[in-house]
Amino acid sequence: MEKSLVYLDNAIELLKKIRDTQADTIDKATRMMFDCFIKGGSLYVFGASHAGIIAEEMFYRAGGLMVVNPIFNPTLMLNTRPVTMTSEMERLEGFGSAILEESPAKAGDVLIIHSVSGRNSVAVDMALTARAKNIGIIVITSMAYTCKVSSRHSSGKLLYELGDIVIDNCGVYGDASIELGESGVVAGPTSTYSGAVIVNMMSVGFAELCDKNGIDPPVNVSANLDVDRTKTEQMICKYLDRIHYL
């Protein structure tokens, strides 16, 4: 169990690093989302394969924002069989553009793209298309990882080069963080918990901005609480034109 405790200690240190180095950038991203919202725009989030877990984290969950819309595609989710197809589809040039074009995203909206390596065509394509549509782009990536790999897109671009705001998840090259001495295998990914903390910081910050500006924060209440859901239902109706997953 020694290495598992090292993993936990490393996780704590990584989250402290996010706090110490990324808080200002996360705040800027949050304000970008809020500015979009108060102007009547819509918010979107995308990630492929395990990066898509962060897109799932951001929508339709207790304590999360009801106005964040995930962009999912069946061939990029982890229930695809064979699951190796997700890696192939991530590298298919033009696919990310097609996915975004089929979404309701428009000029003035904001799109969060999570990609740990930032090298695959689906994320780069989506960012290029978003830029062409004048959609704001918030990138969450690992700078230690992406700066050591080449782009798989014909533009030669990495995702972070296309973001209006770039948040570093402070992870390591290859994502796995714990080296096992005997075998040399490296285990223990970091991007899921770091990504979840980052987007939930953004959600809490967004709700705080709403509260400070006299706006009822559009936050989901757990469906498993014995509470009156009238206010939640009213909130959904109020923002239905910006909730595209219902």
Image: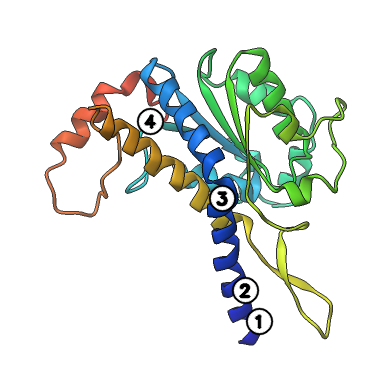
Q: Residue at x 67, y 22 (%)?
A: 98
Give the SS element for disc 3. Answer: helix
The answer to which quarter of the image holds residue 3 is bottom right
Mark pair 2, 4: CA separation: 34 Å
Q: Is residue 83 above or below residue 140?
A: below
**Residue 231 rendering spot, x and y as whole percentages:** 16, 35
Q: Position of residue 120 (x, y in %)?
A: 77, 38
Q: Is residue 215 left or right of residue 86?
A: left
Disc 4 from disc 3: Cα separation: 19 Å
Residue topped by disc 2 = 7
**Which mark lies nearer to you, 1 or 4?**
1
Quadrant occupied by the C terminus: top left
> If you read the primary sequence from the N terminus, does the residue marked by circle 2 or circle 3 appear first?
2
Question: Above or below — where is 54 with respect to 240?
Answer: below
Q: Say whether residue 59 is visible.
A: no
Circle nearer the viewer, 2 or 4: 2
User: What residue is disc 4 on?
Assistant: 67
**Mark 4 belongs to which amino acid?**
Val
Is residue 214 shown to the viewer in this render? Answer: yes
To which residue does mark 1 refer? Answer: 3
